Amino acid sequence: MDEVGVRTPTSSKSRFGRVNFQHRGRLSFMEVKGRHKLRGGFPIRSGRCQVTRRAHSVVWQDATFGADHADPERAADALTRALEGLPFSSDPDLVPLRPMVMRREALDELGSAARELVSLVERVCRRLTEDPWELARLSGMRPDQVPFIGAGGVEDEWSFAACNVRPDAYIVDGTPMFLECNFGAANSGPITSHMLRKTYHSLYGISPRPLRGEAEGAFEARADFYRRICEKRGVPLRVAILGTMREEDIDDPRYFGVEAEYLESVGIESSFVEPEELADDPRRWSVVQKHFLPEEWIRLGIPLEGISKAHRESAFMVSDSGLSLSSKRVFAWLGSGQVPLSQSEREFVRRHVPWTREVVAGPVDFEGREHGIEELALRSREKFVLKPVNACGGEGVVVGRATTDERWKAALTAALGSGNHVLQEYIEPDAGRMEFWDRASGRVRDLEVDYVLGPYIVDGVSAGCTVRHVQKGRNGVVNHARGAALNIVLPADPAES
């Protein structure tokens, strides 16, 4: 990476020998003649792993099925049944058969960098202002996106703004690079992750131990967090999962109920509640997990007054200021010098955040030279991605190399007119692979995939990692709504000597 933060790909790939393994019983034990295995007997292949410049360390560990798995069709059917009604595979005929497996050291670096990013974003925003309403304005939030700011008091607003976070990341040349940082609990990652871990364990006996100091998953980390909150406040241990089945993209009440069931299983009173239920009895719940976006509820005509009043009785996770922290504009602040950073903070941004600038008329620096932002974007379309600052789920994102000159120019003109977009450098992640059961052909397919990693952070604690992946070559936004499968990343355990 040079002085202005542009990374030049220098990664190389090599093929390693296949590890030898033997099954004892039902995939319950494996001996590996090599460097790594996954605890619980998961077959790992060291072929087509990504090799990085840093000591040529292998970032990815590939697991293999096919001839090694007795019945991949049965596994695909079991995964499909277990995840029915939840986000998993967008293509019912192409089912992922396994988690992605990453070297423990690489996954540890990803988690450490994600925690530092979360802390940096919060620090930088609070350097700008301690007023949450002002931060919402500066970060480009509309009033309908953040109607509950301050409803529970300014102290709670800040305390719970960064308590549930999922950055989006690539591994580039062996190094974590963050595309954005999403503060909020209204996402499906923890739900699908919990069900996948259970199903993979049932199928293959996988029981990977968490990294030191980290939680096994988001459900476990959130349960611990809720216990700390209730103990500190001296209130009953009661947690509501607040959502609604009226949202068009939610087909199964398990979407909300899975976590409530888990919390009940570990001694925390919990239930999925609709907004009217919460409004009718706001004092029942000590903690409320917000599994919705306010603007969606406004669109659906759901009254918000009762929810606003309930903020006075309960701790709401995540506060609306989490949406302000999630603004893509914050990444532009980090790299453009608009906010003072220490030397160590600048180095972190240089290493882990791609070049990002606000789309406003005027000069910008790129690759050591000054350019007009419109001229730069039009001349080098394939180098950039255009993003709205306050949208989610890939809405409004335009990938330069995946569109035409005419559409790119139109999108750029609209962005300049709105003043509410960022231009981000397009970066290419290191290679990843996945094995799928192809129902159409009746065979296992080993495919290279584009992917986005989602390390989850709960109150400063790493809590597992999800991954969205799609067959390589689509050159678009990698999310479930656009055809990506939602999966998990597990650590490979060092082989015992």
Image (cartoon, grey):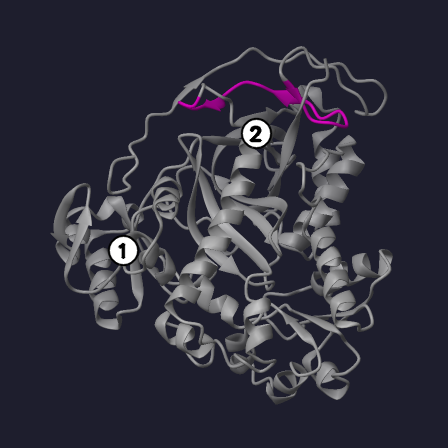
Indicate the quadrant where residue 279 lies: bottom right
Q: Secondary structure at mark 1?
A: loop
Q: Looking at this view, is 112 or 62 the one in front? A: 112
Q: Choose mark 2 or mark 1, whichever is in front.
A: 1
Kindly identify which residue carries mark 2.
105
Residue 151 at x, y = what percent? 58, 82
The three-letter code of the residue at mark 1 reads: Gly
- From the viewer's perspective, tell me whether residue 478 is left or right of residue 235: left
Q: Residue at x 54, y 41 (%)?
A: 112
Given contact means CB atoms under 8 Å apart, are the residues at marks 2 and 1 in contact? Answer: no
Q: Please say if 145 is above or below 256.
A: below
Residue 281 at x, y = what percent? 77, 85
Kindly identify which residue carries mark 1.
337
Indicate the quadrant where residue 136 lies: bottom left
Residue 395 at x, y = what percent? 42, 62
**What secondary structure characterizes most of the magenta part?**
loop
> Is residue 417 one of those drawn in magenta?
no
Residue 175 at x, y = what percent? 43, 34
Q: What's the distance in space between the residues labelled 2 and 1, CA to CA?
A: 32 Å
Q: Earlier in the sequence, mark 2 or mark 1?
A: 2
The three-letter code of the residue at mark 2 reads: Glu
What's drawn in magenta, residue-wise?
36-54
Q: Residue at x 48, y 41 (%)?
A: 451
